[in-house]
Amino acid sequence: MIQTIEAIIDETGKVQLLENIRLKEARRALVTILEAEPSAKVSETALLSEQSLAEDWMKPEEDEAWSHLQSVR
């Protein structure tokens, strides 16, 4: 079973798990280094794709296809 465990890595590379875990045997692990603080910025990919996607989204046939989901006014 794959588990995700939060940890802190100090400047020297020492890893400290933030919770205790028990394993029956040694296991491999992947480490993902996160930003110090979560970023609330918009994804660059989303910004770069917006214009090309808008070309399809703004077509009359798209409005027609999704019209059944719009609330009655």
Image: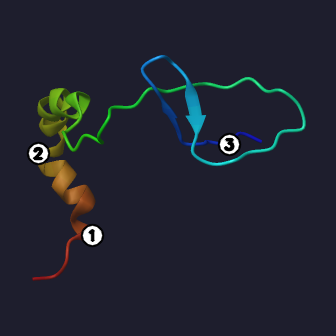
Spatial CA span between label 3 and label 1: 39 Å
Q: Mark 2 touching mark 1, by CB under 8 A?
A: no
Mark 3 / mark 1, whichever is N-terminal: 3
Q: Which residue is drawn at 26% across and 57% down?
A: 65
Task: Identify whether 40 is placed above or below 32.
Answer: below
Task: Point out the frontmost of discs 2 and 3.
Answer: 3
Q: Residue at x 80, y 44 (%)?
A: 22
Residue 66 shown left or right of residue 34 in the figure: left
Picture coordinates of residue 53 (x, y %)?
19, 35
The amino acid type found where label 2 is placed reads Met
Spatial CA span between label 2 and label 1: 16 Å
Residue 59 shown left or right of residue 16 in the figure: left
Q: Mark 1 points at which residue?
A: 69
What is the secondary structure assignment of the residue under circle 1? helix
Q: Mark 2 points at which residue?
A: 58
Q: Mark 3 points at which residue?
A: 3
Query: Looking at the rendering, which quadrant does residue 23 occupy?
Result: top right
Picture coordinates of residue 63 (x, y %)?
17, 56
Along the viewing direction, whichever of 52 and 62 lies nearer the viewer: 52
